[in-house]
Amino acid sequence: MLKIKLFHTNLISIIILVIIFLNVAGNIRAQSPDNLRVEPPFWWAEMQHPQMQLLVHGKNIAMLKAEINYPGITLQEQISVENPNYLFLKLFLDKNLKPGTFEIILTSKGKKVHSYRYEIKQRQQGSANRTGFTPADVIYLLMPDRFSNGDISNDNMPGMIEQADRTNPSGRHGGDIAGIRKHLDYFNDLGVTSLWINPLLENNNKAYTYHGYAITDFYKVDPRYGTNADYIELVKEAHQKGLKVIMDMVFNHCGINHWFINDLPMKNWIHQFPEFTRSNFRAESLTDIYASESDRSRMLQGWFDTNMPDLDQRNPLLSEYLIQNSIWWVEYAGLDGIRLDTQPYPYKEMTAEFTRRIFLEYPNFNMVGEAWLQKESMTAYYQKDAIVGDGYNSGMPVVTDFPLYNAMTKAFTENEGWSEGMARLYYVLAQDFLYANPYYTLTFLDNHDLNRYFNSIGNDIKALKMALTFLLTTRGIPMIYYGTELLMDGQEHKGHGEIRKDFPGGWPGDSVNAFSRQGRNNEQNEIFDYLQKLLKWRKGNLAVSEGKLKHFIPEDGIYVYFRTAGEQTVMVVINRNEQAKAVKMDRFKECTNGYTSVLDVLYGRILTISSELNIPARTAGIYELKK
């Protein structure tokens, strides 16, 4: 077992501080700003929250006195912690604060020891009023290391431990920001409207750094992806093409080689054990009123892995550090949304404060929390305004709908039964009363942690078409995992590399270029065209993007539901049977009264509403009702 020995005992720390105090005048000499790390690296005027915390890191600075002289900024508190290499400065920012630069001066007995130039920037016009993603959007999830390598010169960079090795399914393959920028037109051609990009921040660890979730610098893009400036340009170019950008945020853990893990500010900055202790991953214990404290503690405090120290968000200095980091990236990069990794795993009080602070600055913004839970009630608990017995309110507008995902993995391929087949979809949606807003759930067929959906349904193209139709017409905010349009296959238990394969054509010299029609085979073009038609139709249809859902209990392998917004009504019919079915329309008259015909969206034909509607075997039909 791995011994966790990341910090000295409190006694040793106290002795060190005393020694520093006694010798500070004689032993500390003025040093250059390069010897200090200050985070956030800059901030903005006109923010709504009037306080700011600066983390200052430098050799033996704990006993120095900080001085700031700038109109509109008051140094309210200077906090020294267990580690003498840290100071935390609490600042008050006046509402009349103007952009500019000032010095943070650290002195000993009136003598300057450190001086650091800090900048307050001007916020971009309209920044506070940005609009986040909504149910009108379709999100495309991509893993940057596996999507496209647009700049081979940054595959291996000085100071980065892991080198590129495309032959290793678990290694770095070289995909980068330049590759994403190169293919922005591809997303428009497909018809998606938003990009969720797995973490781009530095992951400077020995191995498994490509996924991005073991961050070693919260303020720096990994140089193997590009630079901070490259990321800013990506967001700008995406916006110019009508695409929104969602950034992954990680609060639960960081990478073992993060600079502050190598020099912990405080012992309770992370969860520590006598021996390595892994989380039990039982998030259900957090809402279970009968759960033991040991189970809850193991869930919250155990590590994800030996290379991912578990952060303790009960530490108010750490909590503020993480919250400010998120706000910094939203403002700096011009983001349209946040996806919060592993929402239940950080302490829930910190998550609630995080959402409050985000929406204080950006009232029309949006965020989705990854609540990987099996039951509807437990998922709903983590959504904003959920009615729960303990009174908790996460403030998180959108949660991931894993219960619906579980239903969709079986609904389109298994035999029909009382609670099987189409009934699985019905039973999940019938529990939507548990959500404060079921239309603000993130729906998906798979993602970067799950079996590829095409694999889950036995490589059944007809089942995939039915599933895509359902995903893009039912309630919620749909998400498509990259490669679904190419029939990508893979099983999670064979290794995450199997479900995170390279996008064909994303690398110089690839024998196949699936970004082009010519580079896709017939089956791939069949599903690409089908998905493209659905996505482009969905963009202009208010009934699907904004409309209320009404569904009818599945009967005889037929599931029928309607989406209605104002004068627009869409009818969706899914026939799971191996033979065509004649659907009797009289059952649905509460939704069809006043309409005389329908437009068959997929085939472009007008049909008269009569007593029956013929639905081909194993297909999903979409019909716009016409008067």
Image (tube, rainbow, N blue to C red):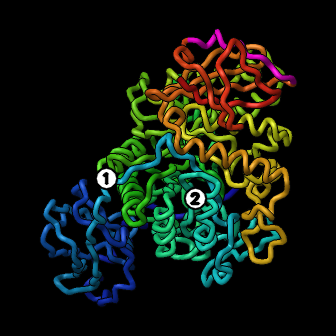
Image position, residue 355 (x, y; %): 38, 45
Q: Disc 1 residue type?
A: Asn
Q: Is residue 14 left or right of residue 192?
A: left
Residue 505 position (above or below residue 579): below
Image position, residue 516 (x, y; %): 74, 64
Asked whether the residues under the numbered discs 2 and 1 touch, taking CB atoms below 8 Å apart as contact, a structural biologist would say no
> Which residue: 52% across, 46% down?
137
Image position, residue 62 (x, y; %): 31, 72
Q: Is residue 504 magenta?
A: no
Q: Is residue 428 left or right of residue 517?
A: left
Image quarter (top left, top right, bottom left or bottom right) of the N terminus:
bottom right
What span is in magenta?
Answer: 579-589
- Report the residue marked by disc 2: 197
- Report the residue marked by disc 1: 129
Q: Secondary structure at mark 1?
A: helix
> Which residue: 63% across, 71% down?
179
Q: Which of the 4 quarters of the picture holds residue 257? A: bottom right
Residue 309 showing in the rendered view: yes
Q: Secondary structure at mark 2?
A: strand
Using a 10 Å C-alpha cutoff, classify the residue at mark 1 as few (fewer than 14 neighbours), some (14 to 19) or many (20 or more).
Answer: few
Image position, residue 337 (x, y; %): 46, 52
For the residue pair 10 and 144, the one nearer the viewer reads as 144
The span from disc 2 to disc 1 (Cα, nearest Å) is 23 Å
> Mark 2 or mark 1: which comes first in sequence?
1
